[in-house]
Amino acid sequence: MILNRIGTIMNKMNIVMICILSLFSTVNCWSEEVNLYSARKEHLIKPLIALFEKETGIKVNIVTAKASQLHQRILREGKKSPADVMLTSDAGNLWKASKEYFFQPINSDILNTRIEAKYRDKNNLWFGLSLRARIIVYSLDRVKENELRGYKFLSNPIFNNRILIRSSSNIYNQSLIAHMISKYGEANTELWAEGLVNNLARDPAGGDRDQIKAIAARIGDIAIVNSYYIVNMLNSDNKGLFDSLGIYFPKDEEMGTHFNISGAGLLQNAPNANNGKKLIEFLVSDKAQKIYAHTNFEYPVVNTIEVPLELKKLGSYEADSTNVYEYGLLSYKAIRLADRVGWK
Amino acid sequence: MTSFIKNSWAYFSVILSLIVIIPILTIFLFLFNTGDDTWLHLKNTVLTTYILNSLILLIFSALGTLILGVITAWLVTMYIFPMKKYIEWLLVLPLAIPSYALAYVYSDLLSYGGYLILIFSYITNYEINSINFYSIYGAIFVFIFSLYPYVYLLARQAFIAQSGTYIEVAKVSGLNLLSIFYKIAIPLARPALVGGVILVVMETLADYGVADYLGIETFTKGIYKAWFNLGDIVSAGKLSIILLITISIIISLEKVLRGKAEFTNNTRSSRGYKYFSLNRYLGFSALIICCIPVCIGFFIPITTLIIWSIKSINNIDLYNFIQLFISSFSLALLAAFICILFAILIIYGVRTNSKIAAPFARIASLGYSIPGAVAAVAVLIPLAWIDNIISNFALQYFNISIGLLLTGSWFALLFAYLVRFLALSMHSVENSFIKIPISFDYAAKVLGKSNSSILSNIHARIGLGGISLGLLIVFVDVLKELPATMILRPFGLSTLAIKAHEFAIDERLGDAAIPLLAIVVVCLLPLFILARGIRH
């Protein structure tokens, strides 16, 4: 009698347990899936993901957040993390993730032949997928083109009170500083940054578009911005601004134009490692690379892909040869350097 | 044992508080990690700026919201002036607009080619290109006009609850309305005002969105920098603890100053204030004064958002948008109910035995001043620990692999909201319970009622106003919440706030406008109910 009752109670408990478990579980009807932690915003990767799902029948589950937040989440979830692939929009965060042993190497001929060596990790832990350049927009009236001579020359006093750039807390600036350190050494870069801060037309404020608008508002003459935002502005109401603005890809004897990557790595404990590998390989396929170029207006990492007119119009360039791995390696030094010279 | 039973409510309250305190304590664990010289670097370079900026922000936002909230609340409580019926609830509406949205809107309107700049130079004929909104003044402006409704709501509730008898006595004694205002109404409303200002202070300190967008170097940004950019969890922990201690000092200072004063209303007359009518000019100025915050905090931003939305209406994916709408709404509603339940039980426990329960309740309410991302990781650490234990247990005894149950589920997210927003619901519940004379409890006890029946029959009914206020404020805040949601959300769950944020940091404000507008619309519904509620 009592045993019977305990039996029924246990049965009920089982049902409750099953209900609770099913509430938490993320199982669904797709047979194949891949879990993606993405620091790229959803609207930027959505067309790519939709195409991947259509072509392979593999469902992609996405969580997007800032790279540093995803980093914390993977760290805390530990070995049982459900994440298969981590996607970031800069090299520094990929380097940080690989330093914590988040990634497993992928041995893939596709990735190694299609992506230039400087845009991927030498141990095959992460891979660049698309490129953005940090370039200069300037006022055609107030700046002569021969005055512009690469990044380093921007600290020259002739630019006093004329330069616009956003805060050093922005990852693109941190990467640029890290890149400079790798080229010129820390002491020289600190001198450069000091000069640059002295030349600023105002305290760093706003995003990249705001720097361009500030030239139009005559606050400064030269803005250091990302190629991506320029193309986006050229496609919007603000197009008129560019009538009096020039675009310049910085380059001098020592250093070519600074490019940052968006990239991905396969996680160490990926439950769907095979699908993760497929996803990353898909992202460097011709179709995917075209989406990067034509929808997001980023430079494709595979150099045989035709870039759209919007990007061609910006001008031709010579990318620097430094491996983007340096951006991560030197990022802590770069942040501290910026703090020391008072680059807000 | 008997004392335990006698105090069971208080102990229960302690247990509930402890659940929330555990993640707060987790932050102290950060200190036991091995750090590097980041702390020294921060101290030598930027820390002073961070502290100064945060102090300036805090002081001016507190003062600004206090002045704005109290004056508007007093005007609509005491006087009759044109359009008052509408102004009364219009004043609450800025609460529906996330403060980061206010920052987006005004920085754009005041930038080169922005509408406000164009209108300004057209009217004044004064040639001006742009106003730099990316400054500490901009941030203060944003905080004042987005947060003053906290003070307004609590002040108004307090003014209404004050008995008209006091005013009549004061009038008979020859005091004019102005002296009644600062000699009677303000001192009596003090707990509510302080409660409102403390909410503003905590919100300002924990803010990341506005400071990040406007490029203000605040203390919270320092925490993010130390932890997420420089990778030093020890410095981040130290900074967080300094933040927590500062807040606790501010709160306890108020408790000490308040001393033994009681603020319950013991007069039997429940007659409210009588309204005073104003002559035409004064009435008109009262209207103008009340319109300023409504326009700046609500109408200008909402119009801008609507204009932006119309421009980008073609980019919208309706199916996805409805999904976002539903998930944001249900998440906020669920979180609001959980928070208010915890708040009622904790506060009632404090009431039955404040010596045991009050200190824990105070600490639990500190969660509101923890920046969202820090709170999220503080929640992740104990949950991941429990998860691993459960998972290993299941593997060992039942041989099934269940992965992580709690982290990466709604549970973790709701827990984080509880830690972050419990203070909001506790403040409003406390404010409404404090006005119920303790003699009611005694009387009910003498009549043989149990604590639970006293709670459900007396406090829950008399305090219904405060309870629904708490419910709605948490609902609105969860709807606007960003960092914790981003870090903890499970696969496939996104919210309107996240969507808006992603577009905004990609510098596509036009596309961000539609989800922002949806947040405002969802917030408006409960705010209407709230606004109707406070009139009765």
Image (spheres, coloured by chain):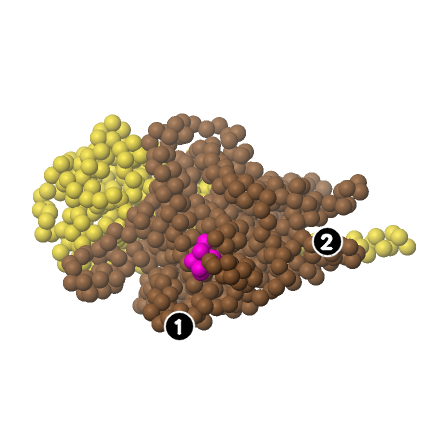
Tell whether B17 sits left or right of B39: right
- The number of numbered discs placed on residues in the rendered structure image is 2
Q: Colour of chain B?
A: brown
* Image x and y of residue B288, in percent: 34, 66
Return the residue nearer the eye: B336 or B51: B51
Return the residue nearer the eye: B24 or B198: B198
- Residue at point 52% right, 65% down? B273
- Residue at point 19% right, 37% down? A198
Neighbor class of circle 2 (other Cα within 10 Å; few <14, some 14-19, many 20+) is few
Chain ID for label 1? B
Chain ID for label 2? B
In the image, the segment drawn in magenta is B176-182
Which secondary structure lies at badge 1? loop
Amino acid residing under circle 1: Pro
The residue under label 1 is: B82
Amino acid residing under circle 2: Tyr
The residue under label 2 is: B442
* Image x and y of residue B367, in percent: 53, 45
* Image x and y of residue A35, in percent: 50, 51
Q: Whole-Å distance between the Cαs marked 2 and 1?
A: 45 Å
Return the residue nearer the eye: A29 or A227: A227
Task: State the quadrant of the N terminus of chain A.
Answer: bottom right
Give the main secondary structure, helix, strand or loop, of the magenta stretch. Answer: helix
Q: Colour of chain A?
A: yellow
- Residue at point 58% right, 52% down? B263
Which secondary structure lies at badge 2? helix
Picture layout, residue A65 above or below residue B94: above
Image quadrant assignment for residue B228: top left
